[in-house]
Image: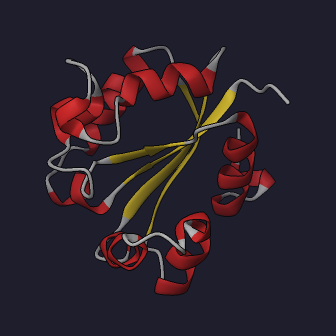
Amino acid sequence: MITNKTFTMLKPDTLEKGYVGPIIEKITAAGFKIIAMKMVRLSRADARDFYAIHKEKPFFDELVEFMVRGPIVVAILEKENAVEDFRALIGATNPAEAAEGTIRKLFADSISENAIHGSDSDENAVIEGSYHFAGREVF
C-alpha cells in the first residue's frame, strides 16, 4: 500500500523549547502540505498504546514517561513519496548521527529526546494517523 501521506508528532521537548514554529517551517519548506494538525496531551495509557510495538524493549517505560511529560503536536502530512522524504528530512533517531540540516540534527538533544517522530512505513503512517485523527479532521 503506497500512500502520499505520513504522520508526525512533535514531542514534548520540542514544545518545551519553543521549536514548533521553526520545525513546521522546515516541514512546509520541504514541500509537505499539512492536512491535519492539533496539539494534544497523551495519557499514560495512550502513550503505552501508541508505542506498544516497543513494550518489550528496555527503553519503553522511559519513552512513555517522556511522552506524557507535556503536550505534543500531531500532524498528517501529504507529499509524493511522503514517508521516505520525511524520514530523510527528520534524520537519524540519534541526533549525533543525523545528517547536517535535518530536524533532529538542528533541534534534538539526545536519542531519547529526539524532537520529532515520523512514520517508518506507509502502513504505519495510516495506523498512526488514524490513532490521532478522525476522518473528518483530515483535509
Please give the name of the residue rendered at 34% of the width and 41% of the height, measured from the top-left corner: 93
Give residue 134's quadrant in the image. bottom right
Q: Name the residue nearer the viewer: 10 or 118.
A: 118
Residue 24, placed above or below residue 67: above
Q: On the rendered image, what quadrant is the N terminus found in?
A: top right
Q: Horizontal and vertical percent for residue 52?
A: 60, 71
Left or right of 73: which side holds 128?
A: right
Q: Horizontal and vertical percent for residue 40?
A: 46, 67
Left or right of 67: which side holds 33?
A: right
Please give the name of the residue rendered at 34% of the width and 56% of the height, measured from the top-left corner: 11
Q: Horizontal and vertical percent for residue 24?
A: 35, 33
Please give the name of the residue rendered at 40% of the width and 75% of the height, measured from the top-left corner: 64
Give residue 79's quadrant in the image. top right
Please give the name of the residue rendered at 59% of the width and 67% of the height, measured from the top-left corner: 50
Q: On the rendered image, what quadrant is the C terminus found in?
A: top right
Residue 8, placed above or below residue 54: above
Residue 20, placed above or below residue 100: below
Q: Is residue 22 visible?
A: no
User: How many numbered tags mark residues here?
Assistant: 0
Give residue 80's quadrant in the image. top right
Q: How is the image coloured?
A: secondary structure
